[in-house]
Image (cartoon, rainbow, N blue to C red):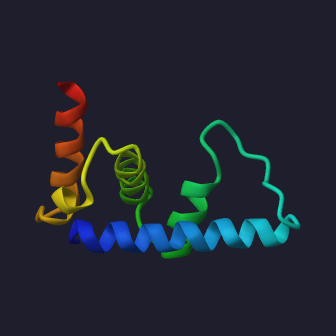
Amino acid sequence: MLPAFVLETVSAAKSFVENRSKSATGGGKLCHSKEGREPHAIHTFLAWPRRRVQDALVQLAAIERKELSKEAIEALASQSAATALLSGIRAT
């Protein structure tokens, strides 16, 4: 799958899961384990492999922190290439 598709889909699913959690708790937050329930909820909702969702969430967080540009990831041919790019940036 193309990284642009994966990022957009995971981002939308993340928003959906967050909004659903807020409405279920009356606007509060659910208790989370150290890992958090969000990746599990997203991968279950999308019926995608857990690793794909986890990698996309890490990439989205890196984009938010401005460690990585969304355009750079979207230009790549695969999600594994996007993961390798982020690993290479963090290694420097």
Position of 16 with respect to 47 (left or right) is right
Q: Report x, y in % for residue 71.
A: 20, 62
Position of 63 with respect to 84 (left or right) is right
Q: How many marks?
A: 0
Q: Residue at x 18, y 44 (%)?
A: 84
Q: Residue at x 72, y 45 (%)?
A: 32
The quarter of the displayed image where residue 24 is located: bottom right
The residue sitting at the right extreme is 26
Name the quadrant of the N terminus. bottom left
Name the quadrant of the C terminus. top left
The quarter of the displayed image where residue 53 is located: bottom left
Q: Where 59 sits versus 12, above or below? A: above
Position of 32 with respect to 74 (left or right) is right
Nearest to the observer: residue 86 or residue 80: 86
Q: Report x, y in % for residue 81.
A: 15, 53
Q: Residue at x 37, y 72 (%)?
A: 8
Q: Where 66 sits versus 44, above or below? A: above
Q: Residue at x 21, y 71 (%)?
A: 2
Position of 17 with respect to 90 (left or right) is right
